Image (cartoon, rainbow, N blue to C red):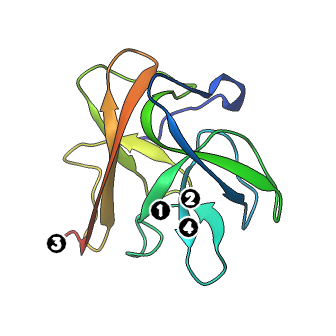
Amino acid sequence: MADLSITAGNVVKGTGAVTAQGTAGETITAGMAVYLDASSNLYKKASTSTATTAAVAGIALNGASLSQPLVVQTSGQITIGGTVAAGVWYEVSDTGGGIRAVGDASHNAGDFCTLIGGGISTTVILMGIVQQGVAAA
């Protein structure tokens, strides 16, 4: 399945948003799924490639380059800056920072899957991060 097409300028925290502040470990765009690299304590683009990179910490609320401040939403409602579907679940994708709808064709053997949340309107995701920590068979 294709990643959401996100317009960074339209990403906005919503009702019940919980945020964390940190530092970018690479160039990040608002709306990207990020993980916190324990070795450097920097936020980096999440992906399904390893258990570490799939451990989504949240979604970036602003853009940042290496070593710049980054605000990350960890729970609550988020206007994601793209079109989503109510009742559909969303997860981290294979693409660094990408978010995609959960679907039968979305997982490859060896992917580490992390649920980010569910669509509650055409623009809003209610975040509820669930990290499996295991690779798909």
Residue 122 percent across, percent down from the top left: 40, 15
Disc 2 to disc 4, C-alpha distance:
13 Å
Residue 13 percent across, percent down from the top left: 56, 28
Q: Earlier in the sequence, mark 2 or mark 1?
A: 1
Disc assigned to residue 36 = 4
- Picture residue at 60% right of the left edge, 84% below the top: 39
Q: Identify the secondary structure beneath mark 3.
A: loop
Q: Identify the secondary structure beneath mark 2.
A: loop
- Image marks 4 and 3: residues in contact by CB distance under 8 Å: no
Disc assigned to residue 96 = 2
Residue 38 percent across, percent down from the top left: 55, 79
Residue closest to the eye, 84 or 30: 30
Disc 4 to disc 3, C-alpha distance:
25 Å
Residue closest to the eye, 106 or 19: 19
- Image marks 2 and 1: residues in contact by CB distance under 8 Å: yes
Q: Mark 1 or mark 3: which is in front?
A: 1
Q: Earlier in the sequence, mark 4 or mark 1?
A: 4
Residue closest to the eye, 103 or 68: 68
Which residue corresponds to mark 1?
A: 47
Disc 4 to disc 1, C-alpha distance:
12 Å
Q: Is residue 123 placed above or below 108 in the rendered structure?
A: above
Q: Residues within 10 Å of mark 1 (few under 14, many from 20)?
A: many
Q: Is residue 66 placed above or below 128 in the rendered structure?
A: below
Q: Earlier in the sequence, mark 1 or mark 3?
A: 1
Type of amino acid under label 4: Leu
